């Protein structure tokens, strides 16, 4: 290849780098048109309205996606109460997720409350909710499904465009004739590969959300019902019960009398001494005198 032709290829690539600064679909479509224009006749222009030609099939693909092939991100939150320890319900919930080829995410527990995040396959989402509902009394449940079909189709189209753009830049790198051209093409190739990896990461994350549904389970202990005082039923009266009641009453009377005497005894002693002295003096005075 002549130096002039490689220079035109490099110029076309650099022009593409300027017009493809954004990672949107317009930048990706332009990256396809520029190398094709550079590899053709010198000074040739890209086909008109390339963006419209490429976006039309994408819109048709999105519109023609059947209902059963819609890409849905399903999430659910369930609140329930159990009579036993909430941790026991969390352990059972983990077993349910594992049996459905899922796994356990974040988990928290404290006191009479515990929660866990479960990830289960999308086609086992309803089955997981049915099994979890049997672990206790469901107090509240919220389900949500977000349709991300358009995002998936758009990302897939942009990924295909970006991969083709990276391949063309690698082809230009193989045809570069000077160190300066190699450096410039490598810089542009590095930028496009970084954009491609970013889009691939986003597509992988979105695909994971579609493939695995999320269930957040919150479990609390049911408070025990208030206890009522036991009412004692009176026994049927009889001779023995009457006798026992009489002895009890007699004992209480004797205890009362004893307590009263014990309380009066100090006063009786205090009054007995002057009383005895008074009686002695009185008898002394009444005694007749002898001749």
Image (tube, rainbow, N blue to C red):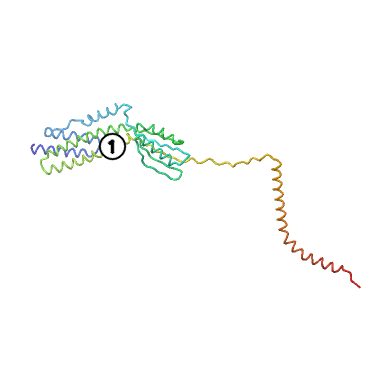
Residue at the outermost front position: 240
Q: Position of residue 28 (x, y in %)?
A: 22, 35
Q: Quadrant of the C terminus?
A: bottom right
Above or below 99: residue 249: below
Q: Who's the residue at 28% across and 37% down the image?
A: 204
- Residue sitting nearer the eye, 117 or 191: 117
Up the image or down, 81 lies above or below 252; here it is above
Q: Which residue, as the protein is rendered here, is positioned at the far right? A: 291
Query: Looking at the rendering, in which quadrant would you find the N terminus?
Result: top left
Residue drawn at the location 51% of the way across and 41% of the way down: 224
Where is residue 178? Give x, y as percent.
10, 42
Residue 7 falls in image quadrant: top left
Q: Quadrant of residue 188?
A: top left
Kindly identify the residue that appears in the image at 23 percent across and 30 percent down: 54
How many marks are shown on the rendered structure? 1
Q: Residue furthest bottom?
A: 291
Circle 1 — which element? Answer: helix
Other-residue count near label 1 (Cα within 10 Å), few / some / many at <14 / 14–19 / ≥20: few
Q: Is 81 displayed left or right of 166 in the figure?
A: right
Give the percent coordinates (x, y) of residue 236.
68, 39
Indicate the quadrant where residue 55 lies.
top left
Q: What residue sits 21% from the left and 38% below the top?
A: 20
- What residue would you read off at disc 1? 204
Q: On the picture, is 278 further left or further right than 38?
A: right
Observer-nearest of 147 and 25: 147
Q: Nearer the viewer, residue 9 or 122?
A: 122
Can you give x and y, in whole percent of width and height, for residue 176 in the image? Answer: 12, 40
């Amino acid at each position: 290849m002549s130096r002039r032709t490689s220079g035109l290829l490099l110029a076309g690539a650099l022009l593409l780098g300027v017009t493809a600064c954004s990672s949107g679909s317009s930048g990706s479509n332009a990256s396809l048109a520029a190398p094709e224009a550079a590899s053709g006749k010198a000074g040739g222009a890209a086909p008109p309205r390339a963006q419209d030609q490429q976006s039309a099939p994408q819109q048709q693909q999105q519109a023609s996606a059947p209902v059963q092939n819609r890409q849905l991100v399903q999430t659910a939150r369930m609140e329930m109460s159990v009579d036993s320890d909430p941790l026991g319900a969390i352990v059972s919930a983990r077993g349910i997720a594992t049996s459905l080829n899922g796994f356990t995410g974040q988990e928290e527990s404290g006191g009479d409350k515990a929660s866990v995040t479960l990830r289960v396959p999308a086609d086992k989402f309803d089955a997981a909710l049915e099994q979890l509902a049997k672990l206790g009394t469901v107090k509240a449940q919220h389900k949500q499904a977000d349709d991300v079909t358009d995002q998936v189709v758009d990302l897939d189209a942009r990924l295909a465009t970006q991969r083709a753009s990276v391949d063309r830049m690698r082809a230009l790198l193989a045809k570069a004739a000077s160190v300066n051209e190699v450096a410039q093409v490598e810089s542009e190739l590095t930028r496009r590969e970084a954009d491609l990896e970013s889009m691939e990461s986003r597509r992988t994350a979105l695909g994971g959300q579609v493939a695995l549904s999320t269930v957040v389970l919150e479990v609390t202990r049911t408070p025990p019902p208030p206890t009522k005082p036991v009412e004692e039923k009176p026994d049927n009266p009889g001779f023995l019960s009457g006798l026992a009641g009489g002895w009890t009453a007699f004992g209480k009377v004797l205890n009362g009398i004893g307590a009263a005497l014990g309380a009066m005894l100090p006063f009786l002693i205090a009054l007995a001494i002057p009383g005895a002295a008074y009686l002695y003096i009185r008898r002394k005075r009444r005694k007749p005198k002898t001749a």
